[in-house]
């Protein structure tokens, strides 16, 4: 699919490329807006939360009573934000040896 462009055709080719890039940027921007709308925060029930975290309902109730897990209470019902649960899970993330070595290297280099 090799296409030879002469020197005289170069400005038009650049203009076409620029127009195509503008269209791609517009499509990507529209898609990111659509994805953001789809990812609007979901609220989970206690059972959905237990399924999501792969824990029992009793364990979830225990974590709620100890304030170990983010939750909302309305009346007698508990609700859990999916975004908050994802943050909760990520806070428990432990760095691998490679990641720790990389962080140490960056820290040493930044202090030089």
Image (cartoon, grey):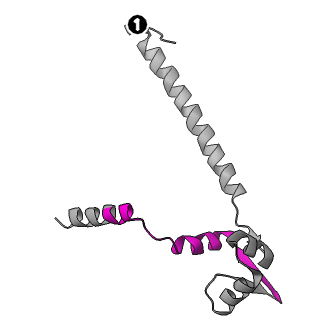
> Helix or strand or loop: what does disc 1 sit on?
loop
Mark 1 is surrounded, within 10 Å at the Cα level, by few (under 14), some (14 to 19) or many (20 or more) other residues, namely few
Residue 37, image x and y in percent?
Answer: 70, 56
* Residue nearest the observer in this picture, 4 or 108: 108
Residue 80, image x and y in percent?
Answer: 72, 77
Q: Residue furthest right?
A: 76
Reply above or below: 4 against 58. above
* Residue nearest the observer in this picture, 106 or 51: 51
* Residue nearest the observer in this picture, 36 or 88: 88
Q: Is residue 20 magenta?
A: no
Residue at point 22%, 66% (across, down): 108
Reply above or below: 49 against 25. below
Left or right: 37 in relation to 13: right
Q: Which residue is mark 1?
A: 6
Residue 87, image x and y in percent?
Answer: 58, 71
* Residue nearest the observer in this picture, 78 or 46: 46
Q: Residue furthest left?
A: 112
Count up the numbered dots: 1
Left or right: 109 in relation to 1: left
Left or right: 33 in relation to 112: right
Q: For the C terminus, give its image quadrant.
A: bottom left
Tell me where the magenta segment starts and ends, as one range: 76-101
Q: Quadrant of residue 96?
A: bottom left
Q: Quadrant of residue 105?
A: bottom left
Reply above or below: 75 against 90. below
Residue at point 68%, 92% (across, down): 65
Q: Is residue 84 magenta?
A: yes
Left or right: 78 in relation to 94: right
Residue 49, image x and y in percent?
Answer: 73, 74
């Amino acid at each position: 699919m090799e296409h030879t462009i002469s020197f005289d055709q170069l400005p038009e080719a650049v203009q076409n490329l620029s127009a195509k890039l503008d269209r791609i940027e517009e499509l990507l921007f529209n898609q990111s807006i659509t994805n953001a709308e789809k990812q609007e925060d979901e609220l989970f029930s206690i059972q959905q939360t237990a399924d999501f975290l792969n824990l029992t309902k009793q364990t979830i109730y225990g974590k709620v009573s100890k304030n170990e897990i983010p939750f909302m209470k309305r009346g007698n019902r508990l609700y859990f934000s999916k975004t908050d649960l994802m943050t909760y899970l990520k806070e428990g993330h432990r760095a691998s040896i490679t990641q720790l070595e990389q962080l140490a290297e960056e820290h040493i280099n930044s202090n030089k």
